[in-house]
Image: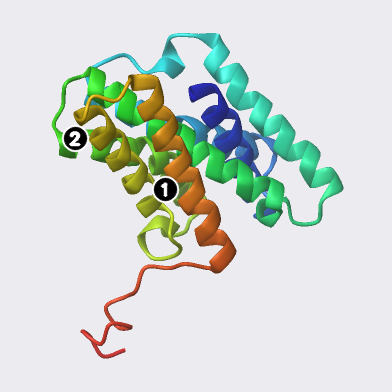
Amino acid sequence: MNTIGLIAFALVGSAKAIREKFDLFGITVVGLAMAFAGGTTRDLLVSRVPLALQSPIEISLGLLGVGLAIALSAVLPSPDTHPITLVSDAIGLAAFATTGAIVATEANVSAFGVVAIATINAVGGGAFADILLDRSPFILFDDFYASCAVLGGSTYWVAMSVGTVGSTAAVMCAVVTVGTRLVAVTYDWNLPTAQKLGLIRS
């Protein structure tokens, strides 16, 4: 799960930086930030050394994602909005939500902690990448995105609570997360704003 998430998110982050015309160093920084920021935050929350600092393999996987993004940009006009990138993003979201839920469960945190860490692991990198791109994190105002990780993390906790085998719970988390994300992209789902609900005048 972690391997899939690293490559997919590095690809997505780098594609965003390419669209903004960053240089190669900037593309690499944004790609690696999206790949590692969420997982690093997760590890710090459960008091362990971030995986990115433990093995060169982790960084190598991130760089592979950066390389794939550059290669795609050479053959695709808008790699950041291409279906390959959107599907990669959904897979990365699911992989990191699942990894976060597993790590949180092993750390014996509460139900809220499992869902929160799964969500942070899944969307933290994207939020940090948006900050580097000088824009507000899109998870706060656009698209049905972080909610998918919340649903996935909740599914994992419920499954484990009723005695489901860990590997089965992980698959359920991943399927719910990637499934809801792909459906959200297909049907353009968005959470309503306070203005749309009529609570505040626009």
Disc 2 versus disc 1: distance between alpha carbons?
A: 19 Å
Q: Nearer the viewer, mark 2 or mark 1?
A: 2
Q: Assign a secondary structure to mark 1.
A: helix
Disc 2 crowd, CA 10 A, few/some/many (<14, 14-19, 20+) = many
Q: Nearer the viewer, residue 192 or 16?
A: 192
**75 relative position to 167: left or right:** right
Q: Is residue 84 above or below residue 48?
A: below
Residue 79 lies left or right of residue 146; in this view the side is right
Three-letter amino acid code at the position of disc 1: Ala
Whichever of callouts 2 and 1 sits on the residue coming sooner in the sequence is 2
- The one nearer the camera, 145 or 127, is 145
Assign a secondary structure to mark 2.
helix
Residue at screen point 84% across, 44% down? 74
In the current view of this chain or complex, which residue is farthest to the bottom?
A: 201
Furthest-top residue in this view: 55
Q: Residue at x 60, y 21 (%)?
A: 61
Location of residue 163 by image quarter = top left
Q: Which mark is residue 113?
A: 2
Tell me where residue 53 appears, x and y as whole percent. 43, 14
| Crowding near the residue tagged with mark 1, few <14, some 14–19, many ≥20 C-alpha atoms within 10 Å | many
150 on left or right of 13 = left
Quadrant of the drawing holding the C terminus: bottom left
Count every numbered label the image shows and give the total: 2
Kind of residue sitting beneath label 2: Gly
Q: Is residue 137 visible?
A: no
Color scheme of the displayed model: rainbow
> Which of the pair 180/110 is nearer the observer?
180
Residue 132: x %, y % from top left: 48, 47
User: Residue placed at 53% from the left, 68% from the top?
Assistant: 188
Question: Closer to the camera, 137 or 188?
Answer: 188
Residue 180: image x %, image y %? 46, 52
Q: Name the residue that disc number 1 marks.
A: 127
